[in-house]
Amino acid sequence: MTSKQFNGFDVSWYTKNKMKSFLKKVGASFGFVIVLMPIFGIILSIGNAANLDVLKNIGNILFANIGLYFTIAIIIGFTSNKGSAVLAGILSYLVFNIFISSFIQNPDKSFFNIWFWKNLQSNAYLTKFFFGNIKTFNSGVVGGILIGVYVTYIFNRFKDTNLPKGLEFFSKEKLTIIISVFSSIIFASFFIIVWPVIGFTLTFIGSGVAKSPIGIDSFIFRTFQRMLIPFGSSLLWQSPMWYTQIGGNLVEYQQDLLIQYLIRTQELTPDLITNLLSITAKGNDQTSIIAIINNVLGDKDLNNVMNDWFTNTQEIFSKTGDQFIWIAVSNSKLITIDDCWNVGFRVSRFISGGYVNSIFTLPAISCAMLFLTPKGERRNKMGMYITAGLTAMLIGVTEPVEYLFCYTMPLFYFAIYCPFNGIIAALTSIFKVKIGTSFSTGIFDFTLSGIVPTVNGADTRIWIIPIIGLIAATIMFFATYFWFKYYNEKEKRVNIKARNLRDSLYLFLDEIGGIRNIKNYQINDNKLNISFKREPEVSKLFNTFDVIEKNNNEYKLQIKENKMEVIELTNYIISNRITKKGN
């Protein structure tokens, strides 16, 4: 096993490659979930646009149980797609959530109790589980991944285990299903103890991210997301922002969002609006929030309106993560995208910048690379560049273009392309572009997530995307063209020099009778001491040497200045031949 010193540690080649393989497996596993998003998004978008309750309910159920898909995805990725392992994962997910649900007290109230935890906020910790009115922890992606991890471990650990005679029917893969189901009860018990703390921590981090200066969070997210693409692990960075509390949670904005709703829908005087927006007291549940607002409203009775609002927004407040929140509010009349931005929650800030990159920047890079292709090769490579550019533009899959240059031009990719993406994301956030996504960031999703909500009355500021996009495409086209042209020409110069050196080496070796004819070879400054097995033709040596002196069988040769590199290269070749013979 080969290893090398790295900062004082022995880093194993095997260990590094195992880590790369692991990260690629995780990224590929998450891909199974990501590919479901357009299906769910289309169903929900059509349901909202056509006001079809059946499609809206289907879409909401599919998104509400995102944890199950991550459970299955992890298992598929790390068990070679074993059906029995997937079945164990589904059963474990069901048992895990039903067990937790059975201990929740007062799930329909503003606060609930579970075991020794008292007065936990329902909107922050609970969500609907599949059908009916079953409530369970809103563990989402985190819970789904953890279930997938322990089911995968159990399957790989016990899949070949045999039981004693009489119990052999339950051996091997059947045993893993049984162990996984019972382990889910133990894990659910542990989860009841720790999840309120984990949930609070994730919410606290998400709150800090949401309140950071506008554009900073988008820049950091987008820059690092692009940097992880060559390693196949961008989804490890993206998923927490899009699907968990780190990407945001609307619960702490309840009071402000209700005030925004009242201002939009009720006939209020300017003074009353000013007073509502100036409220400093904060309630943390339905009763206290309504009481605070009523103190300002005075004789104006809006209790029924406010109670209905709380009843009908419970599902929205259970959503976490930038993408899920955007999907929930994009077609809602109770909480709109503008309401979120008005209260300081910049929904879609981790998404909008991607449309500029997919629809404008990457096709421009692809075109620049095509124009730099030599004319004789352009026709053969045209299909590759056009297909890669259209793939990014239409469906938002960016890797085909990025893989064309991230490995061959790493400095350009990491020092220019990735930060440039971060700047674009920051600009879309600063200019309040409010376009989310159901899958990716191509024209298809731009239509569903940008044009359709805009037509339905949402103020998405969609027109800013093509303005930033055209400017970004122009900048990146010329940056790509001149950067690649410079390094291509530099590479050509290096190749020409290498070919000239190779030709000079062959000529020199021919002059001295070949490498095998050398008996002794030693360089001293600009002189070469050399002896031969067979005498070479002396006249040919003047092509490489200025002065030739012979003492017995040894030659002392003064090297021409422009031939020094050939002499040193020959010395390198001879040294390697001697080393190999010694081994």
Image (cartoon, helix red, strand yellow):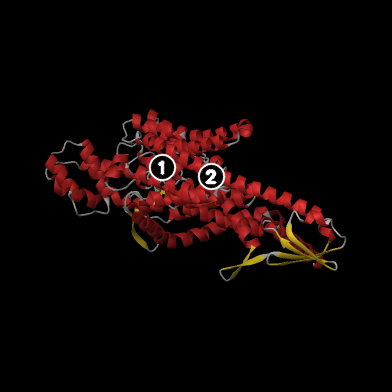
Residue 112 seen = no
Q: Earlier in the sequence, mark 2 or mark 1?
A: 1
Q: Tell me whether circle 2 and circle 1 mark residues in contact (CB < 8 Å).
A: no
Seen from the viewer's position, the closer of residues 389 and 173 is 389
Identified at 43% across, 63% down, the residue is 193
Horizontal side, residue 429 vs residue 505: left or right = left
Question: Which residue is farthest bottom?
Answer: 8
- Residue 562 x, y percent position in the rendering: 67, 55
Residue 99 placed where, x, y %? 48, 55
Q: Quadrant of residue 374?
A: top right
Nearer the camera: disc 2 or disc 1? 2
User: Relative to 110, is 469 on the left or the right?
Assistant: right
- Residue type beneath disc 2: Tyr
Query: Is 271 placed left or right of 341 in the picture?
Result: left
Q: Position of residue 456 (x, y in %)?
A: 34, 30
Which amino acid is tagged 1? Gly
What is the CA distance from the residue labelled 2 to the residue labelled 1? 29 Å
Whether residue 440 is situated above or below residue 234 in the rendered picture: above
Number of labels in the image equals: 2
For the C terminus, the image quarter is: bottom right
* Residue 80 tag number: none
- Residue where numbered disc 1 is placed: 353
What residue would you read off at disc 2?
486
The residue closer to the viewer here, 561 or 64, is 561
Which residue is located at x 39 percent, y 28 percent? 50
* Residue 510 seen in the current view: yes
Q: Quadrant of residue 264?
A: top left
Nearer to me, 321 or 214 = 214
